[in-house]
Image: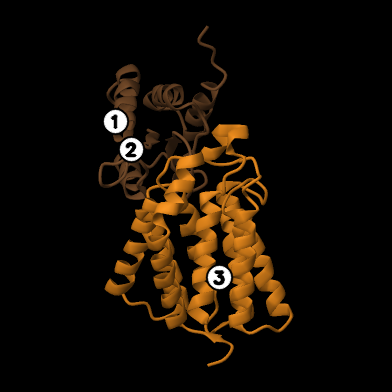
Amino acid sequence: MVGVVLVAHSAGLAAETAELARGIAGREAPVAAAGGTGDGGLGVSIDRIEAAVREVDRGDGVLLIPDLGSSVLTARLLEEPGRVVLADVPFVEGAIAAAVAAGGGAALAVVLAAAEEARTHRKL
Amino acid sequence: MAGMLDTDLFLAWTEGAARAVRLHRDRLTGLDAAIGDADHGTNLDRGFTEVGKALTEWPPTSPAQVLVSAGTTLIRRVGGASGPLYGSLFRQLGKSLDTPVTLAGFAAAFESGVQAVERLGKAAQGDKTMIDALAPAARALTQAVQEGADEHKAFERAARAAEEGAKATIPLRARKGRASYLGERSIGHEDPGAASAALIMAALAEAAA
């Protein structure tokens, strides 16, 4: 299964979004949260992102979904083409779409495409 | 030794940069409060303090080690966008250096470091970012080398170009980073990343003085 890592400035935002995504996609979906700085502040910790990647890496690839700004820049440093890839998608909607696809056993490219569809998905 | 840039020079650079960032921490945070999220000075101060600790704990034996270690620490410890950006600058600069380091080799490696920042941030000169200070500094450095300047003169010219580049961000509208959310309201403020880049380049000139 493809792993999904949610990278956010806030630990709470990342953890609760992961909880929501797992709640919709099913508990078996490998979704991990990497939010906030190491000392519990608002910001990004590359150590936390790396730990989250290790947590959900089943050998089928990992999708990183950042919220904005330094999350994006820090996540980009961990990109490994074809193995660890970044999704430029709305955070919550992208996380849910990716988790559902990953939980269903889709390949990395398909999980990425599912997350990217969230960008054009209308709510009304 | 004239014309050779040694490990001590690069250690002095990182120490000088740490002192400058500490001294100007509140000014940098104030600039960031105007158009960003008011953490640039605090974040960079923490990052460069950790750089000092890392370099004391694992003493480097080459210029490349100083810069790669500094870059890795900044990436891990800053916590804001400037961490990956400055981290990439220092890491790429370090990785591009041949030993012994000549001024021409440093100028080429610095260009490569600035390009790494541009790639990561997808920013170009004029976007009101640290690139507005770093890119002119890289050009000034390369030009100084071509004109046969020694490292004192070359680093001074790079520092001056960075300072002028930082001041030139004041009338610009931000197109990257947090400030870009402000649109027109970002006009009239110096970019904090360009301001810190100017401090870091000034620290290099001081280290070689």
Marks 2 and 3 share the same chain: no
Of marks 2 and 3, the one in the foreground:
2
Q: Where residue B34 sits: x, y (%)? A: 49, 41
Residue beneath disc 3: B96
Which chain hosts label 2?
A
Is A104 on the left-hand or right-hand side of B107?
Answer: left
> Which colour assignment does the render follow?
by chain
Mark 3 closeness class: few <14, some 14–19, many ≥20 residues within 10 Å: some
Residue beneath disc 2: A35
Question: Circles 2 and 1: CB distance less than 8 Å?
Answer: yes
Position of residue B162 relative to residue A68, above or below, is below
Marks 2 and 1 share the same chain: yes
Going from N to C along the chain, the mark reached first, 2 or 1, is: 1
Q: Amino acid at mark 1?
A: Gly
Which chain hosts label 3?
B
* Alpha carbons under labels 2 and 1: distance apart: 7 Å
Which type of secondary structure does the marked residue at label 1 adopt?
A: helix
Q: Amino acid at mark 3?
A: Ser
Quarter of the figure with residue A56: top left
Where is the N terminus of chain A found, in terms of image quarters? top left
Q: Where residue B204 sits: x, y (%)? A: 51, 73
Q: Amino acid at mark 2?
A: Gly
Which chain hosts label 1?
A
Residue beneath disc 1: A12
